[in-house]
Amino acid sequence: MTIHPHDLTPGKIAESAACKVHMLDPVARFSLRAHEPERKAVADALELDLPWYVGDVAKTGETEVLNLGPDEWLIVAPEGQTDFASRTVDAPHALTDISDRELTFRITGPRASDLLTLGCPRDPDSIKPGQGRRTLFDSATVVLWRDGENDFRMDIWRSFAPHAVSLLALGCAELAAE
Amino acid sequence: MSKFRVAGRGRVRHDAPVSFTFDGRTIEGRQGDTVASALLANGTHLMGRSFKYHRPRGPVAAGSEEPNALIGTRRGKGQYEPNTRATMQEIWPGLTTTSQNKYPHLKFDLGAVNDRAYMLFSAGFYYKTFMWPASFWDKVYEPFIRAAAGLGVSPTEEDVDTYASRYLHTDVLVVGAGPAGLEAARAAASTGLRVTLVDEHAEMGGALLSEPHVQIDRLPAWDWLAEQIAELQDMGVKLMTRTTAIGYYHQNMVGLCQKLTDHLETQPHDTPRERLWRVRAGQVILAQGALEKPLVFDGNDRPGVMLAGAAQTYLNRFGVRVGDEIAVVTSHDSAYHAAFDLADCGSRIAVIVDTRALVDDALVAECARRGIPLKRSHTVTGTAGRLRVKSVTVNAVEGGHVGKGRAYKCDALLMCGGWTPSLHLFSHTKGSLKWDADAQTFLPDRMTEACQIAGAGRGLWGISAALQDGATMGAEAARALGRDAAARALHAAHDRPGTGASHTELPTDQPASRAKAFVDFQNDVTAKDLRLAVKEGMRSIEHVKRYTTNGMATDQGKMSNINGLNIAADALGKPAPQVGLTTFRPPYTPTSFGAFAGYHRGDHFELTRRTPIDGWAEDNGAVFEPVSLWRRARYFPRPGEDMDAAVSRECRATRASLGIFDASTLGKIEVVGPDAAAFMNRMYTNPWDKLAPGRARYGLLLGDDGYIRDDGVIGRLADDRFHVTTTTGGAARVLNMMEDYLQTEWSDLKVWLTSTTENWAVIALNGPNARKLIAPFVDGLDLGDDALPHMSVTECTFMGHPCRLFRISFTGELGFEINVPARHGRAVWDKLIEAAAEYDITPYGTETMHVLRAEKGFIIVGQDTDGTVTPDDAGLGWALGRKKADFVGKRALMRPDLVLANRKQLVGLLTDDGETKLEEGAQIVLDPDQPKPMVIVGHVTSSYNSDAAGRPIALALIEGGQGKMGETVHIPMPDRTIAAKITSPQFYDPNNDRLKL
Amino acid sequence: MLLIRCPYCDETLPELEFAYAGEAHIARALDPSSVTDEDWRDFLFIRSNAKGPHYERWRHVHGCGRFFNAVRDTVTDRFLTTYKAGEAKPDLETLTGDAR
């Protein structure tokens, strides 16, 4: 099954008794960078909680912040709710709008975790519900959020998405046929 | 029903007949049969011809170690597979199978003449027979070898099946579901660990399937087995049958190949044929058991001669007697039980020949009870029969002397030379082996992985021992993973472990030179070949292996390695452990290419990146080319146009009016932070301090070796923010290099890098009408030369979208690059095309882009540079911030080799005739008449027909070229030599007047 | 395929998430212009090519993105340890003593 980029519109991509893959509506997405000594000052200025451990997610209202590395956070917010981006931050940091860089897919269903094993060399169980990680899916870098036991979100660079999503769609059918 | 099928015996469903074909003949088997067991049930032993001598062969084993009974299977169109083991392929209605390596017919084969000419094919025959005359190699020898050698025929149709792969993380992986594996899985799973148990056969049970008489915990073996499997399932153990562990890699990574559909008549939807599992296990338990060794004697390969354990399996698992009148030759107790079971099912045992003088009294008594003639201290010196064994010659051995032979009639001859632990997977891990002198075999010794070996795989014989050891090792694995575990003790009754002796070739009264005593059945290697190899000077077992091909076939020495070693050691006069074993390599059994390819074939072969505007290009007839992982529109031919015509038109239209180009693939990196300019100063050759926000500059990136790595236009958006562009192919590499310096050399800098390549769709507009087209869309922004001069950038609103608008040019024409959020790229493009109808807007692709830039003498990194080109070589010395204390590559530019005058330098080339287009990559010489090999002074890097110049143009790297302006060089080609003049690389508008339009 | 512990994520993960990045502890001079041609050549091109424990750099490129250092035995392919960039070279004898 091959999915072309223009097929990728928000809504259902694939569904079976085993799992479902949906493309989500666009969100505002920012990359935030700051060194540890300035983390608190940046967090206070942005009025966001910046988690300390790699993989942890903090929520402030509807804004989610995922720690991707020692000096890196991914901020996701509903479109138009990005007040934090215009606040004054005196401490050294970098805030870059990457809203259009990735597309996001929600992967759910009783075998959602197994579906990821088609392309993800990391053990999905090493990501606890409520956490996220940057990792690999079928040779593409992705950010994988585990929102629940069987509920994942995958952020993937726009041009890599058709390839990865083709495999997810194929896997939906394959897992259901087992 | 065939007389060889034993009613009520085995695990096949006697009430479920299944028909398939073998060489066009319809064969009836039973549900649960393999092709081999079904053919044997019909009295057929002859299943193929051998590799070299085309000798008739039948199955010698009953499992995946089978070297002889290789068949072609056809499940449907595009579903032909050669070299399938008949002993592993399950039958189903309509399965089509064929024998292999026969011409014209299995029973009458012309290639069998090789057998008579066997003197020609002895060890190392490749190296001797075909030595001279040398001219015979291409026309005579190689075609002969290619025709004669090989097993099955490769499929020619495209494989219509699908293949899959998955990663699996498990605490404990148990390989082999015999008694040891079952108990190991249970012991580990009972502690709550995630356990996976795999077996290559259609059902679990291993040796228990062939030994139903055993009682475990007072239950018949098969009842106990059913109970165990159900309990393991309840415990959450992942059970996988038809799944072979093919390779054991670092840190407990084990590859599994699971066959999902080869045994099915109807292919289920959405189910792949095979799935490759990449398993990562905390602990691996190898419970693969042992393989039976053949005995080595003249005629041991005749159809009907097989391993005693295999005959026992055919009888007890499949309900098939392998013959009516059966002889047995053995050096081990276990063959007796095969004989007894067969005798009890109606076969006549003609004789049991035991090479040993002393045999367990109980076995002797059982022979006597059944009236089986037993010949101790005897040997077998030959067999007779053309397509099936008809008799065996048995001789007494007394004091080393072989007596007169007596022939026994038989239609099957069972042999057993003892058992060898299956060491293959263990050997993949480079675990070391130790020699067990009693068992005359190697056992696993020092482990390199978190691994346990249970049961016969470490030389423990019998069901009781296997059960006990499995439980022990399962508990051991669990403890290693921090669980509190205990092994349970089970009692097995009617167990028959036994002992035996080991041999090289069996003693014989025949001249050694005439004996065809096979060691490697699949490669037709005899004991004589091995001895000859040693005689001819091979000392290392690895050399003996390669000289004779022993153990090199698809069975990877499963049967031949130990016998081969024993014979080679004997010939060398060294003890076996000093000679050692050859290396076992993955995969354990032959594995399809499909399984390795998995999902990555057809459309999913490799990731293809497409820009947001790719769909428009596709709809408008673009011809694409791959650029790194991207596909980019190369040109947009109109009906009747070839590439040259289309590119010429696109170039002309762009310079005359307006061209539009999808530049979205350009790498983009946002450099942000208070130290952004400091970082840029260190990273790029150019000075950045004085670049004001809103301005852009061509940036040149070197490696610390001083050579050009990448380039691109860099815009300064704010004091602390740069928008860096890179080449399409260099994007990831450049970001990685920047991160490397930033993280490891300059970690004091407060600056961060973010890839924004895919955040923006980039539309380049070039041509005198570019400004006029975009003016209505920029929301009142002043696009004049003063407000937005060449090499500047502004953040604005474009068609209502946030936009980074660059005024830059890679073509020499007035140019703009419109960066809009990727999701809006297509809409903006469409609207621009629509609005620009009056300007004759022309979409152009990468080819036109290349021509337009070459006309201006702009380099393409990777095309005009090759990793050994410095900025001065490329004529880019002006881009060096020479006053800066340091930048990446600066120090190297002072190295002696990098300042030599005669370095290759980038220049223009114009062919003297004004018509010939040079070939990119063509070599350049100064004197066309010099003797060969000529002194090469450079090569052509770029070459195009230029519409603007009205003639072909080229760029070239030539030694000292910048000092040779106007000189003539020569480009020798196969058919002629082309003369060309060295010129400046700027062929068009050298004063850049057109940028100021 | 190896398993590699990322000292920043404190997780042991498949090699596929990582990229090799050459020998470790080869520092770029703070003032390259003061370095001799020979020393600069050595910095650029000369590597230890160790048989046995080797100090090397890896990047958790499909993860936290950090470069870090490792000691790996080039004979067995086994990692003896991994540690953050900037941390001192671990003592080899302690490491091999533990691992063997």
Image: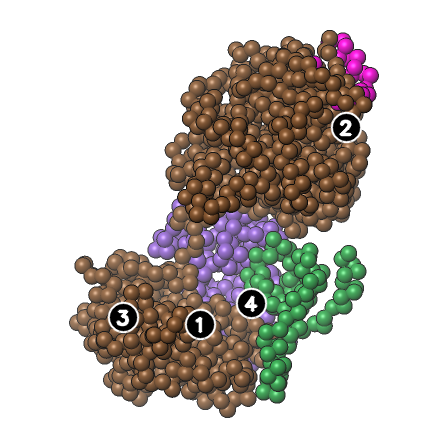
Q: Is residue B24 above or below residue B596?
A: above
- Chain C shown in which color? green
Residue receiving disc 4: A73
Split into 4 quadrants, where in the image is the C terminus of chain B?
bottom left
Residue type indicated by callout 2: Ala
The residue shown at (56%, 33%) is B119
Which residue is at a point 71% across and 31% down the rendered structure image?
B504
Q: Which residue is mark 3?
A: B917
Chain seen in brown: B
Tag 2, which chain? B
Q: CA distance from mark 2 to mark 1?
A: 67 Å
Q: Chain of mark 3?
A: B
Marks 3 and 1 sit apart, C-alpha to C-alpha, by 22 Å
Relative depth, front residue between A150 and B57: B57
| Colour of chain A as rendered | purple
Residue position marked by numbered label 2 in the rendering: B501
What is the quadrant of residue B911 in the picture?
A: bottom left
What's the residue type where badge 3 is placed?
A: Lys
* Residues at marks 4 and 1 touching, judged by CB atoms closer than 8 Å: no
The quarter of the picture where residue B590 lies is top right
Q: Is residue A169 above or below residue B855?
A: above
- State yes or no: residue B362 in magenta: yes
Three-letter code for the amino acid on which mark 1 is drawn:
Asp
The label nearer to you, 2 versus 4, is 2
The residue located at (76%, 62%) in the rendering is C95
